[in-house]
Image (cartoon, rainbow, N blue to C red):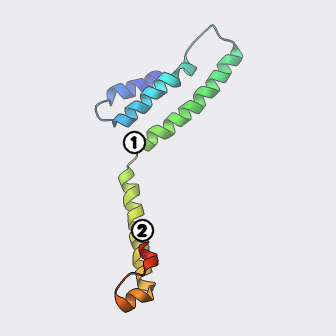
């Protein structure tokens, strides 16, 4: 599994954002050792290492997914929601309807 992740990094190195490459490097340096084949450890140590590695793998997957997602869409959606809220606030604001100005509580 670690080999596949490192292979992915090598194949897409030129197209991945640098923060994603850094995330993969951190995974390789800190987590991959828990998946190593070491015959000099006990069964309990293997189990404990695998659980630690699985938690680390879960963290890695979440972090890498975050770095690879399209944040622009999220920002655009939140901005649209904020503008719709502002429009609705202006519509119901009596001061704006009277004076043509947004009430101070809306601007803050």
Q: Quadrant of residue 34?
A: top right
Q: Residue at x 38, y 28 (%)?
A: 8
Q: Residue at x 52, y 24 (%)?
A: 30
Give the crowd class for mark 2: few <14, some 14-19, many >=20 residues within 10 Å: few
- What kind of element bears circle 2? helix
Q: Is residue 40 above or below residue 52?
A: above
Instruction: Tell me: 101 left or right of 3.
Output: left
Disc 2 from disc 1: Cα separation: 25 Å
Q: Are marks 2 and 1 in contact (CB under 8 Å)?
A: no
Q: Relative to 81, is 14 on the left or the right?
A: left
Q: Nearer the viewer, mark 2 or mark 1?
A: 2
Which residue is farthest top? 40
Residue 38 locus on image (x, y percent) = 58, 11
Q: Residue 54 in the image: x percent, y percent?
A: 59, 30
Q: Residues within 10 Å of mark 1 (few under 14, many from 20)?
A: few
Check disc 1 and report its element: helix, strand or loop: helix
Residue 13 - label: none
Q: Residue at x 67, y 21 (%)?
A: 47
| Residue found at x 33% / y 27% | 11
Residue 32: x %, y % from top left: 51, 22
Kindly identify which residue carries mark 2: 82
* First in residue order: circle 2 vs circle 1: 1
Quadrant of residue 80 within the rendered picture = bottom left
User: Farthest left residue?
Assistant: 14
Quadrant (top left, top right, bottom left, bottom right) of the C terminus: bottom left
x and y, in percent, of residue 52 in the image: 62, 27
Residue that badge 1 annotates? 68
């Amino acid at each position: 599994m670690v080999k596949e992740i490192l292979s992915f990094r090598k194949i897409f190195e030129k197209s991945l954002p640098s923060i994603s490459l850094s995330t993969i490097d951190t995974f390789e340096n800190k987590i991959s050792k828990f998946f190593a084949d070491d015959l000099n450890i006990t069964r309990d140590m293997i189990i404990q290492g695998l659980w630690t590695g699985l938690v680390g793998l879960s963290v890695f997957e979440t972090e890498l997914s975050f770095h690879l997602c399209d944040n622009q869409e999220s920002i655009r959606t939140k901005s649209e929601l904020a503008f719709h809220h502002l429009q609705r606030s202006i519509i119901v604001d009596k001061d704006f309807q009277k004076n043509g100005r947004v009430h101070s509580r809306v601007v803050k």
